[in-house]
Every structure is written in structure tokens, then in C-alpha cells.
Image (cartoon, helix red, strand yellow):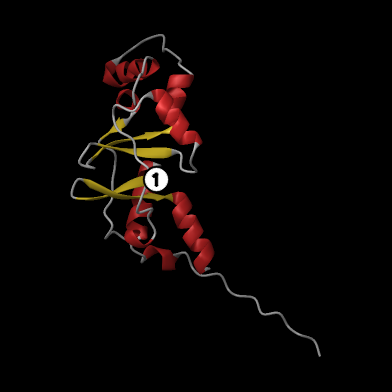
Amino acid sequence: MINKKTTKEPTSPRKLMEIRVSEVMNKRPRVVYEDTSIDGLLERILGQIEDCFPVVDKDFRLVGIVTESDLFQVLYPQIPSKTVGSAKIREILKYSAKTVGDIMTRRPIKITPEMTLGEAMGIMASHKLRRLPVVEGDKLVGLLSLRHIIELYRIIR
């Protein structure tokens, strides 16, 4: 008798769209502070899987986010030949950065735990982001990354 192997049909990605952010996010993301040194940030990035850190104040209010891309600008400075506008001035300031506060993105795009993954992925897609801080009010309560969504999809399919 031949045993037919049954194959499971993959779950539609639409199923992901209804899941709440709170069910998938990292509820205890590692954080840094504005006064964390660049050397301290380098050590932390090398010691974890995530490639970004939410930046919080002493009351755990989200004040920014810092990524490997921000660090790259410190490690590989390319001073533009012409400087125009505040964005270029911020780039130049990153070259002489001493702390996370010098290189972080202030007022990052954020989401809430009640949002669905569909809503969060829409924000990720429209802003070309791979991770989003999750807040309740102004307090950081988690971090959602594309990796978390991919891992969930792999489990449920």
C-alpha cells in the first residue's frame, strides 16, 4: 500500500493582516539613552540580533530611534561638496557624533499595540521601514520588526 503524503496548503498572508501588533512585537526591546556613547552603542549592536534601538528618556518615553544605518554615517563619513539645508547640516553633525543623541532619528514613526499587522505593514511599506517602535501614549511598550512578522508567518503557514 502506498502512503500518500499530504501537503499542507500555505496560509494566506491575509490571515496576518488581522493579528494585533501586541501579539507579535518584542515586549522588552533593548533601549539606549540619548547620552549613550557611540562606543557603547557599537557594543550593544554587536551583542544582539536587532539592528536598531529605541531611544528613551528616564521615564521610558520614546524620544528617537537609532539604527545601524545611523552608525554607518559615523563610521564612513562622506562630507558633501555643497551643503544646503538643515538635512545636510544634520548629516555633517553625525560625522563628529559623540552620543546616540547626535545621530538618532528624532520623532520616529510609531505604532500602537492595538493596531493590526495589516495597518503596521502598510506604514512599513509606505515609509520603507523594517521596524517600528510601539507606544502607548508616549511610553515605549515594544518594537515590531519585519523579522517578527516573517517568523510569525512561518509558524502559522
Q: Residue furthest top?
A: 81
Above or below for 63 versus 36: below
Q: Is residue 50 left or right of residue 60?
A: right
Query: What x and y, as percent, mark residue 70?
Result: 41, 28
Quadrant into which the N terminus falls: bottom right
**Above or below: residue 25 compared with residue 156:** above
Residue under the image location 49 percent in, 56 percent down: 150
| Residue 73: quadrant of the picture | top left
- Picture residue at 40% right of the left edge, 42% below the top: 128
Residue 117 pos. (x, y %) = 36, 59
Q: Which residue is mark 1?
A: 131
Q: Residue furthest left?
A: 137
Q: Is residue 90 left or right of residue 47?
A: left
Number of numbered discs on residues: 1
| Secondary structure at numbered mark 1 | strand
What's the amino acid at mark 1? Arg
Q: Kindly give the residue lying farthest to the right in the view shown.
A: 1
Residue drawn at 46 percent across, 43 percent down: 50
Q: Please say if 154 is above or below 37.
A: below
Quadrant in which residue 10 is drawn: bottom right
- Which residue occupies the foreground of this view, 117 or 136? 136
Q: Is residue 51 left or right of residue 108?
A: right
